Amino acid sequence: MTFSSFRLFYILILNLCLILSVQANQLDLSQRSNLKPSETIHLDSEHVLLLDVRTQREWDAGRIKGAVHLPLKDFKAKLTEIVPDKTQQVVIYCSKGGRAIAAAKYMNNLGYHAVPVVKGGYSQMLSAGLKNSD
């Protein structure tokens, strides 16, 4: 192998590694029912709506930066206002997971595409490194 062909081979391998690294950071939510809290760090906030279904008191005590608040008690009445596009990628969380599961089931029954729930909820997301909103 000549130096120039070795160099070309090396460049191709580096590019492949870069492509695989980028793809690894993009989560495919289409077949997911839940996410690990650590996976939520990699969500693209421009394309994925992070929906918080906790109570107003919980929301006021702290929230994840970029999340949208829709308390479960208002969920049915305001869902189509907050998420009018059923193809919108949505990830739901609450404090531990129960309310988020109920909200995700409701959305899936209405025809929204896969709506994963964050395992462990808000506190686990903070522990995984997500930032609290100011």
Image (spheres, rainbow, N blue to C red):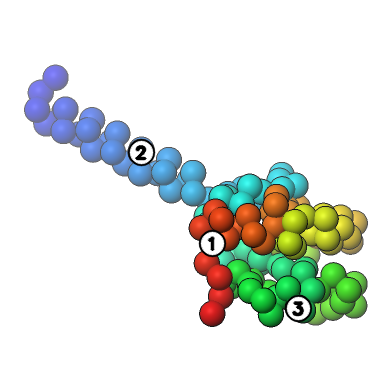
Residue 44's spot in the image, x, y percent?
A: 54, 61
Give percent across and percent down for residue 71: 81, 74
Q: Can you tell which quarter of the image residue 51 is in?
A: bottom right
Q: Which residue is labeled 3 in the image?
A: 57
Sequence-wise first label, 2 or 1: 2
- How far apart marks 2 and 1 lie (CA) works out to 26 Å
* Viewer-nearest residue: 95 or 103: 95
Query: Disc 3 on helix, strand or loop?
Result: helix
Q: Please indicate, yes or no, whether residue 54 appears anywhere in the rendered image.
A: yes
In the figure, residue 83 lies in which quadrant? bottom right
Q: Residue at x 60, y 57 (%)?
A: 125
Q: Nearer the viewer, mark 2 or mark 1?
A: 1
- Work out whether residue 36 or residue 56 is closer to the camera in this orientation and state it: 56
The residue under label 1 is 130
Mark closer to the observer (1, 3): 3
> Farthest residue in the left direction?
3
Whole-angstrom CA distance, mark 1 to mark 3, is 20 Å
The answer to whether residue 88 of the structure is visible from this angle is no
Amino acid under label 3? Arg
Question: Is 106 situated left or right of 57 in this image?
Answer: right
Q: Position of residue 86 (x, y in %)?
A: 78, 65
Query: Which quarter of the rendering shows the N terminus?
Result: top left
Residue 132 occupies which quadrant of the picture? bottom right
Residue 27 position (above or below residue 43): above
**Residue 31: where, in percent of width, then height?**
71, 44
Mark number displayed over residue 17: 2
* Residue 28, placed above or below residue 78: above
